[in-house]
Amino acid sequence: MYDKALALAVGHIRGGPNEPVFKKPFVDAAFSANIFLWDTCFIAPYAKYHLDRLPILGALDNFYMLQDSDGYICREYTRDGHPFWPKDHPVSINPPLMAFAELEVFSVTNDRARLARVYPALLKNFDFLVDRYRLEDGLFFSDAFGSGMDNIKRYPEGWQDDGKGIPLRQPYPDVFDYNDLSSKWNRQGRSVDFSAQMVLLARHLMRIGRLIGKPEHDNRLAAFASETGAAINAHCWSDADGYYYDLGYGQQIKRAHIGMFWTLWAGVVPRRRQERLIANLTSPARFWRTVPVATMPADSPDFEATGGYWHGAVWAPTNYMVLRGLEACGRQDLARRLARAYYSAVTEVYRRTGTFWENYAPDAPAPGRPAKPDFCGWSAIAPIALWHEYIK
């Protein structure tokens, strides 16, 4: 299984003289001819074990090369280097995880010179996101599709377009009906996952700054992390449910999804709240299904037992996020239990189908519906990264 995953990933290497823009070899997300930011970042956790064969740094460099002077990095670029999504709409950004990916590779290479080269670009991207997407209460707004959880509904139940969102002026057909309400809900809300990801980015930038001997941004990054974490806890925590919720018009939106567990990894969950949040994670009636972790709880009316893409399917990047979050709050025992359960399900499906899938069904060891096959891609996290970190 390990060898097959590695072979698939190697087979998806692109770049070279026949590419119009991307002249250096890079390991690809294996989704389309475009390059994808958060897919690339979640290739790093397993590519770090095979840097001689999987050029993940070339993949990250593609995004630095295309970064705008104000720090903007689009989440998806075409093969000829053009941003696929419009800069003025939050659909154009992904979870900001390039600093995480760089630190993953650094854990193997110890290459401080590399970190020093990319640090200015990472810091500029952080500043762009803060300037563009942080609102007066200290939280961030985003877009459902841009969040990476493509077809999750993030607006309040029964909401109709009020004209207060940032409009998407260019039509995008056949992308989960993206031109309906989903594209019109953004500035009206606050996203717990994006807010927590920005805290995580600040902490990773602080670590990189210290590693390269440039801690001069520590104070402002630490203050940002503290203020944003406090805002998440002040506005988004439901004591009745032991859970965080996104906001809409200052009210909690009672739509549960896996994005709330980014708070664990970001280190913003007070110790007194951790067990209640984790109880939601481990509940078989909610997220801990036959194959953990479902991206939408089973008691949600939108949950689909076969996956429905982000309506319950089990995804490698979000599982890896949960694992990092559990370890960050000292729950290595539970992280090991999750890693082994997920690895076992991936193994069972591999034995039956001979390959790895973009996502998996939550209620049976099976490919999700829909899901692309031969997806390595980030799905190689289980057979490679989890094998190294939890199985062997």
Image (cartoon, helix red, strand yellow):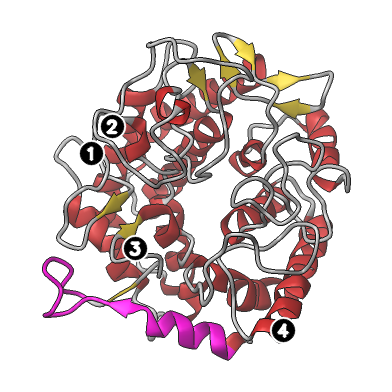
Secondary structure under badge 2?
helix
Are the residues tagged 1 and 2 within 8 Å (C-beta)?
yes
Closer-to-camera residue (44/301) = 301
Tell me the distance, in whole angstroms, between the alpha carbons under discs 3 and 2: 24 Å
Q: Residues within 10 Å of mark 2 (few under 14, many from 20)?
A: some
SS for dot 3: helix
Relative height, residue 333 to residue 270 (above, below): below
Q: Which residue is mark 2?
A: 128
* Percent coordinates x, y for residue 377 in the rendering: 47, 69
- How packed is label 1: few (under 14 Cα within 10 Å), some, or many (20 or more)? some
Crowd class of label 4 (few under 14; some 14 to 19; many from 20; radius 10 Å): few
Direction from residue 12 to residue 85 in the image, left or right = left
Q: Quadrant of residue 364?
A: bottom right
Instruction: Please state which amino acid type lies under the numbered disc 3.
Output: Arg
Type of the residue with mark 4: Arg
Q: Quadrant of residue 357?
A: bottom right
Quadrant where the C terminus is found in the figure = bottom right
Image quarter for residue 1? Answer: bottom right
Indicate left or right for 180 with 71 as reference: right
Q: Which residue is mark 3?
A: 112
Q: Nearer the viewer, mark 3 or mark 2?
A: 2
Q: Are marks 3 and 2 in contact (CB under 8 Å)?
A: no
What range is drawn magenta here?
3-24
Q: Which percent across, then down, holds residue 335? A: 76, 58
Q: Residue beneath label 4, please?
A: 352
Label 1 residue SS: loop
Q: Nearer the viewer, mark 4 or mark 2?
A: 4
